[in-house]
């Protein structure tokens, strides 16, 4: 009972600390231009919060699925795959193509490609060879290295002007946040994160192991596929900012 009370107090203290930090970030050292500073900093603050929340949620769910408290989704090369997709789009179509100039079309195309890739990764890591952490680590590192090598090769032979466009799209930056994509990301991530929070009881059951989860009535294959697709979507939304 005391442990629950202590955890509740810790959560309240951390929540208050976050609120105070946000207030300081938005108002400190504005030099009299509070409205301008608030408009500029609020976008960066929302991007910080979105990236932090999505990364944390995706990592915790992935660690629950793999029953390993060290692994992160990056181990299977999802971030490297996103960079490769953006590089291939500009390499094949150029910077003036609609897939490059239209951020919404690029966003949803990348999302569909990442979902398709997540289904392949799911079948390999959780359906074909479930529970083999060594295989997950080995193939994940190989896939990440392969995606990175192909990306580097394409960036070397690409036009310098197009390389600048690739660099601006694939390097994380909080100084220039795309407000339109930020709003789309929030509207898309919100339901996903809410759904994952509502699944905490089932996620606790997954900690017991695959056989126990099946015995307690969870359709493990379908549930793992759903979680893996949601993780991929959350990570892609984070990378698109």
Image: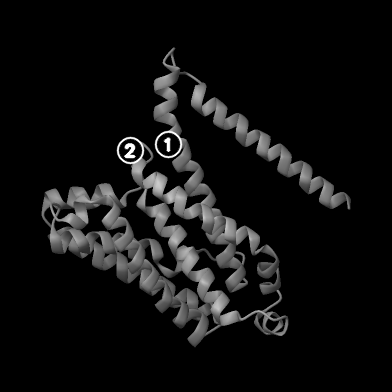
152 relative to 143, above or below: above
Quarter occupied by residue 23: top right
* Label whose residue precedes the other's in the sequence (2 or 1): 1
Q: Residue at x 14, y 64 (%)?
A: 92
Q: What element does badge 1 sit on?
A: helix
What residue is shown with label 2? 176
Number of other residues with Cα within 10 Å of mark 2, as a class: few under 14, some 14 to 19, many 20 or more: few
Left or right of 145? Residue 53 is right
Residue closest to the eye, 192 or 12: 192
Left or right of 107? Residue 226 is right
Query: In the displayed image of the protein, which residue is found farthest to the bottom?
Result: 128
Left or right of 139? Residue 129 is right
Q: Locate residue 20, reporting x and y percent.
A: 61, 29
Residue closest to the eye, 95 or 190: 190
Q: Residue at x 42, y 53 (%)?
A: 238
What residue is shown with label 1? 44
Q: Residue at x 71, y 75 (%)?
A: 208
Q: Residue at x 60, y 80 (%)?
A: 220
166 relative to 132, above or below: above
Quarter occupied by residue 79: bottom left
Query: In the displayed image of the protein, which residue is found farthest to the left?
Result: 159
Q: Locate residue 66, reporting x and y percent.
A: 58, 73
Query: In the displayed image of the protein, which residue is found farthest to the top?
Result: 32
Q: Locate residue 18, reporting x and y percent.
A: 61, 36
Residue closest to the eye, 79 or 112: 112
Q: Locate residue 12, reporting x and y percent.
A: 72, 40
Number of other residues with Cα within 10 Å of mark 1, as a class: few under 14, some 14 to 19, many 20 or more: many
């Amino acid at each position: 009972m005391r442990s629950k009370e202590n955890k509740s107090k810790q959560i309240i203290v951390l929540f208050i600390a976050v609120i105070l930090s946000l207030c300081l970030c938005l108002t400190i050292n504005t030099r009299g231009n509070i409205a301008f500073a608030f408009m500029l900093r609020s976008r960066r603050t929302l991007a910080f919060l979105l990236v932090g929340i999505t990364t944390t949620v995706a990592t915790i769910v992935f660690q629950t699925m793999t029953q390993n408290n060290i692994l992160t989704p990056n181990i299977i090369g999802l971030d490297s795959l996103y960079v490769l997709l953006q590089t291939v789009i500009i390499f094949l179509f150029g910077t003036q193509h609609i897939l490059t100039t239209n951020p919404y079309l690029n966003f949803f195309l990348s999302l569909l490609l990442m979902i398709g890739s997540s289904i392949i990764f799911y079948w390999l890591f959780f359906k074909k060879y479930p529970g083999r952490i060594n295989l997950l680590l080995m193939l994940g590192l190989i896939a990440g290295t392969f995606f990175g090598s192909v990306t580097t090769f394409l960036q070397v032979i690409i036009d310098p002007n197009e390389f600048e466009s690739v660099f601006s799209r694939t390097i994380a930056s909080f100084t220039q946040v795309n407000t339109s994509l930020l709003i789309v990301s929030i509207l898309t991530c919100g339901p996903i994160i809410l759904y994952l929070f509502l699944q905490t009881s089932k996620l606790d059951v997954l900690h017991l192991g695959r056989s126990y989860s099946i015995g307690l009535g969870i359709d493990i294959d379908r549930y793992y596929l759903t979680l893996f697709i949601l993780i991929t979507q959350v990570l892609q939304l984070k990378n698109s900012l």
